[in-house]
């Protein structure tokens, strides 16, 4: 299970193809081999009110938070973080070359004792 939440400044709404970035992250997460396909969820949220660095309204940010079920080793989590971040950077590099953007990613564990789960996605996956 891995939940990806992308928080971004509103001034990037038109600059980034958000459905494409969400799908790129989903595929990159699955490609690591660390996360089961049925457990990957990626969503993006626009922040309409932000103040960044020196207050210049041209600055933007993209902050990606990954929450996952505890139990993976630090080495495995570091590898997955590195691979996913590299895919995101590659996609965003052309945009970041032309404007001021802060890009960050954080992965953290969810305590399974405090996070009950249920669902039927696996029942509906093809093949």
Image: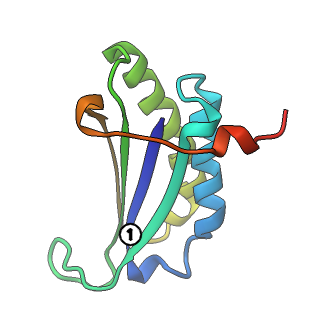
Residue depicted at x 32% and y 25%: 70
Question: Count of labels shown?
Answer: 1
Q: Of 21 and 89, which appears nearest the observer?
A: 21
Question: For residue 100, what is the image quadrant?
Answer: bottom left
Q: Of 86 and 44, which appears nearest the observer?
A: 44
Residue 50, x across and y down, in percent? 23, 80
Q: Is residue 77 above or below residue 121?
A: above
Residue 13, x across and y down, in percent? 50, 80
How has the structure been colored for display?
rainbow
Could you tell whether 73 is left or right of 51 in the image? right
Question: For residue 108, what is the image quadrant?
Answer: top left
Circle 1 SS class: strand
Q: Which residue is mark 1?
A: 8
Could you tell whether 26 is left or right of 84 in the image? right
Residue depicted at x 57% and y 42%: 87
Residue depicted at x 37% and y 23%: 78
Within-10-Å neighbours for mark 1: few <14, some 14–19, many 20+: many
Q: Is residue 80 above or below residue 55?
A: above
Could you tell whether 44 is left or right of 74 in the image? right
Could you tell whether 9 is left or right of 22 in the image? left
Q: Of 66 and 117, which appears nearest the observer?
A: 117
Residue depicted at x 54% and y 57%: 92
Is the C terminus in the top left, top right, bottom left or bottom right quadrant?
top right
Q: Is residue 43 above or below residue 32?
A: below
Residue 73, x across and y down, in percent? 35, 13
């Amino acid at each position: 299970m891995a939940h990806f939440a992308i928080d971004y400044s509103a001034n990037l709404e038109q600059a980034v193809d958000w459905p494409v970035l969400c799908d790129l992250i989903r595929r990159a997460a699955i490609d690591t081999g660390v996360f089961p396909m049925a457990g990957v969820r990626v969503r993006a949220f626009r922040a309409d009110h932000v103040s960044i660095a020196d207050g210049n309204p041209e600055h933007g940010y993209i902050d990606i938070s990954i929450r996952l079920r505890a139990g993976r080793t630090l080495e495995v989590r570091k590898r997955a973080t590195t691979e996913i971040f590299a895919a995101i950077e590659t996609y965003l590099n052309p945009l970041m070359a032309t404007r001021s953007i802060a890009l960050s990613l954080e992965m953290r564990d969810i305590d399974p004792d405090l996070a009950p789960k249920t669902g039927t996605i696996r029942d509906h996956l093809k093949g």
